[in-house]
Image (spheres, rainbow, N blue to C red):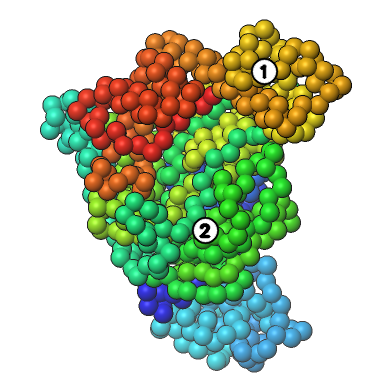
Amino acid sequence: MTDFESVDALLASVRVEAELPSADERRALRLALKLSQADVARALGVNPKTVGGWESGREPTGEVRAKYAYLLEGRAKLEPEPEPEPEAPEAVVTEPEPAATTPATEPEGDDVELLTQPAACVLCGGPATHQVAGFPQHLDPAECASAMPQAALPQTAPPQAAPSPTPVPVAARPEKPSTRRAFQSTYDMPDVIGDAVRAALEKHGGDLEAATAALVRRAIPDAMSLLDACRKGARYDIIGHPWIPEILRKKTAKGADEIWEARPKWTRPELPPGRHEITALDINGAYLSALKTHLPLGELEHSSGNHHDRRRAGVHLITPPDWEYEDVLPNPIGARDEPGPLWVSEPTLRLLMRLSTARYGLCEPPVIHESFTSGATENLLEKFRGVLRDAREKAIEENDDVTLEYVKAMYSKFVSTMGESNYNRELYRPDWMHIIRSQAFANLWMKAYKAHDEGLAVVRAMGTDELHVLGDWRSVFPEGRGVAEVKVKDVYEAAALFASPVTSKRGLLARLHYLTKTAHALSAAREAGLTATDRTVRAWLSGKRSPSRANLERIDTAYWAVRRRNVARHLLGRLNSRGGTRVELHPLNQSQVARPHQRVLGFRTLNIRHWDAIVRAWSVGDFEALDDAWIDQIADLGSDWGKYEYVTNLGFAA
């Protein structure tokens, strides 16, 4: 990136908040343009409900505010210009003498006033914003020169009297200078996604499954071609193979680099007493939304010190702050137990700094030790994201599963292969890959915070798109399949869990009550190793006696064994009900899979009808049996089953 491009990147990051009319005027202007809220939402890349909120008084921010203001200004430009008022031209004809004796470059003083509306300049006839000694005129001669016609003569002599003065035409009002760039619509592009789908269907004689499989196989090159098309005429070039610091390089073929992506894997340690109905929400298009993030434009440059420049982006070595809200919200740096500094990407750092502000006050600011950054922009992939988003929404409206799977494969594989991958040689940006993934995790964290702030109990946050909540979630999140909406993944019941250790009075009594509430539970506890007599257990419950350290360990071991057994029984019944449970396979990250076994994998679904072997192996911790049970099930994928044999984990919600 040249020095001038670096300056451009800095200037592009400076934003001036655009002025907006009142909420009622916003709605009136939209209706005058004969546009629906959905039309405006599509053009601005937001949800129609968001546009409705703006028309009810909510205020947009950032670039979308500038786009919204630009759209509303378009209505004003369509209205005819009002006829010029006669008063200003009369001043030109009848009393020009004071203007001739008053220099146009006179400094502002008592005779200089700012006009509320532009009026015709007495020297050139163009619109002037000041008046001198009561007469409108430009203060800068250059403004007069630019507004004056080439054939116009200087008015050095008083005009001759005329029966009826001829009005001086008022020049058209010039456009106000703006610091923002006009946004580019995604609709001026050819329908490359639709063309590819139609060609695949025609080639395979209308066979939906064959066409989908073919499109998924070519998703990576098609995504790169779409990116190239979206970048034509763009302000910044994409540097596909820059120099990469060692912290972003894998140490071994099977290993990982040094960047911590802050992936959440959190479960609320304790629920309120009683049984609760919990809703597992699926966040739509998590990686698609995460494409809107601050991406470094050029090669990463090293810097040291506890300073963060918001006009740059990259990776940072930080000491994260202490997190004191683990009981109600996940730690923003994810499930990390190791203390000390760690390398994080830009979204994680910005999230921590945001939570340290007075608005949130949830933690101290992170300490930055060193960074690798470059000038950045948040809109580098915005047009690419907009085309994919529009194609996805259209496919949902038309129940077009072929296009939907194709688009999903394009953006998911685009993210997963931009690092060290043999399947995408055109782009080697592991920094972008970490940043986009971390942005997806940060987006999920902010949704968890929103749920908590609105009074819901956050029960679980996993990966990029899984959020479990307790309460009326529909009052907080819009339901649907759009990118800005969520859909229900599962609804299940759960009882209070015990986070207190067995060495505390609360933890001990909770475990003893769980193990003795029924004869079946007590029998299972005996089988799990609890050998104390009924009389001794009653003494422990009454507090007359305390268990020894050995008995505390037996109680804790028995509790978790019995609970795992009960969960397995409940889980098996739920998974096997109604003819089995459909699962989704998301093989996006193969970094832990040996390179000879890595494959080009697509999003697949599989209906598992019999879960007995899987749940049984899980309940007793037999991972070899679990592996065998998994292979037995994926054989139903047909000839592709071998591609999904090598997985690092298999998870399901209890």
Direction from residue 543 to residue 285 in the image, left or right: left
Extreme residue in the top direction: 519
Q: Quadrant of the N terminus?
A: bottom left
Q: Nearer the viewer, residue 384 or 371?
A: 371
SS at badge 2: strand
Q: Is residue 210 above or below residue 56?
A: above
Find disc 2 in the rendering and name its residue.
Answer: 344
Image point (63%, 65%), residue name:
367
Image point (60%, 35%), residue name:
267
Residue 531: mark in rendering: 1
Direction from residue 429 to residue 488 in the image, left or right: right
Give residue 97's quadrant in the image: bottom right
Q: Quadrant of the C terminus?
A: top right
Q: Amino acid at mark 2?
A: Val
Q: Amino acid at mark 1?
A: Thr
Q: Tell me where residue 253 appears, x and y as whole percent.
A: 31, 54
**2 or 1: tag closer to the N-terminus:** 2
Image point (48%, 78%), residue name:
147
**CA gap, disc 2 to disc 1?**
49 Å
> Which callout, 2 or 1, points to the residue nearer the camera?
1
Q: Tell me where residue 644 appears, x and y as whole percent.
A: 29, 34
Is the residue marked by circle 1 packed among few (<14), some (14-19), or many (20+) residues within 10 Å? some
Is the residue marked by circle 2 packed among few (<14), some (14-19), or many (20+) residues within 10 Å? many
Q: Nearer the viewer, residue 208 or 163?
A: 208
Image point (46%, 36%), residue name:
284
